[in-house]
Image (cartoon, helix red, strand yellow):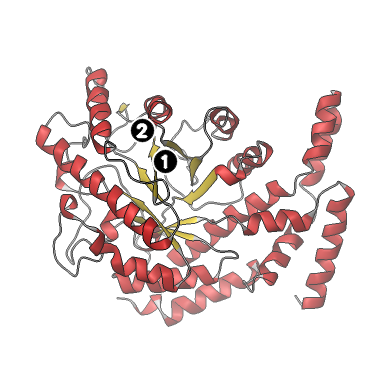
Amino acid sequence: MSKYKLNQAFEIAKNRYAELGVDVGKAVEQLRRVSLSIHCWQGDDVGGFEAPEAELSGGGIQVTGSYPGKARSLAELRQDLEKLISLLPGSHRLNLHAIYGDFGGKRVDRDQIEPVHFDSWVRWAAANAVKLDFNCSCFSHPLADSGFTLSSKDERVRSFWIEHVKRCRRISAYMGEKQGDPCFHNLWLPDGAKDRTVDRFGYRGLLLRSLDAVYEEQLPDSAMKDAVESKLFGIGSESFVVGSHEFYMGYALSRGKMICFDLGHFHPTESVADKISSIFCFVDEILLHVSRPVRWDSDHVVIMNDEVGSLFEEVVRSGRLAGTHVGLDFFDGSINRLGAWAVGSRATLKSLLFALLEPRERLLGYEEEGDYFARLALLEELKALPFGAVWDAYCAQTDTPLDREIIGIIHAYEKEVTGKRS
């Protein structure tokens, strides 16, 4: 599309929205201030680089597909990330798991990692104008094979993982200090059992005590912030997950931690969007992990579907966008990985823009008047408004490729780069 036609389409869209009282420029500016925390693990199927021969082992992670061209080293992962960043409008963050440290080809166990193992990431982030977030990696390790880590009844296992998470929090604080912006550290555990469990209370008591031990070290909020992430079930933990939503909700509220809502970690018929207004009655900040479950926590690539749209509608309607930190968490090894990253990241941004373009005042007016027909009619009308022209204009304003250009760019990168990886 020529620049003239793109501008013409944008002016038409801007006027359509203005008729409903929507300031398109303000909505775009709000979107511009949102930084996605892009998950590094889409690039290599959650493998990490602990050692050249590292293989996934134990604990609740499953990636399907063997599409060629995945990143085999830190250099290749960073190359792919730099390409991804060029495809996204706005400024964004990178979310690292502990298994992605720069270990120099040496085996460094999880309870021995230090900030020095992430110095090259700090330098890379600064060079690419990216801020870092971090996650402990309590999976894919022999001491996670039992299905229990921080809630294990083996004190040796618990102690190992407590030390690992403590070190991850210190690494997060180190990153936050270096970048002059808080690094969000998120804790997720695979702990649970495949079949009926008698001592649920006992396991949860152990997890409670382990978490208190992990968080006893006070680190400055200016450098890092903690979040805890629940799950309904996982492969190998179909009947019992220690860190349920109720457990972590209670823990977060009583200990002053952020709650992380992952769209794939709830019952398929449960609305995560409906939880937003409830939790914001009690807290100032939350962390989101945007994903797309299909029948289970399958972490499909994010698209503009009802679940993601409703989620951001509730964030915007609650007036809590500033307190909502948006991370991505999906991984698909069956298609081009960079393409999956780009589609999912851009779909998340588009879903948020769609929510920001909602004529909230007019909708609220109808609701307060009890005119629920008009409210419903306007919500339906919004679906046919020229939203795409606003998105295209935003991409053009930020020198970012339009949606229709993405396929060609990804194919060219595959031909020139990822297709040459054996």
Question: Which mark is drawn over residue 297?
Answer: 1
Percent position (x, y) of residue 326?
52, 49
- What's the CA distance linking mark 1 and mark 2? 8 Å
**Image-based side of 196 in relation to 95, left or right:** left
Q: Amino acid at mark 1?
A: Asp
Label 1–label 2 contact, CB within 8 A? yes
Residue 48: x and y, percent? 28, 60
Instruction: Please tell me how many numbered marks the rendered image carries.
Output: 2
Q: Is residue 156 left or right of residue 318?
A: left
Q: Is residue 79 visible?
A: yes
User: How busy is the neighbourhood of tag 2: few (under 14 within 10 Å), some, or many (20 plus)?
Assistant: many
Between discs 1 and 2, the one toward the N terminus: 2
Amino acid under disc 2: Phe
Q: Residue at x 77, y 77 (%)?
A: 3
Instruction: Give the vertical position of 304 relative to 388 (above or below).
Output: above
Residue 334 located left or right of residue 377: left
Q: Is residue 362 above or below residue 106?
A: above
Image quarter hosting the C terminus: bottom left
Which numbered marker is on residue 233? 2
Q: Is residue 158 left or right of residue 399?
A: left
Secondary element at image label 2:
loop
Name the residue at the bottom extreme.
Answer: 416
Which quarter of the figure has residue 243? top left
**Residue 393 drawn at (x, y percent):** 73, 66
Q: Is residue 231 above or below residue 325?
A: above
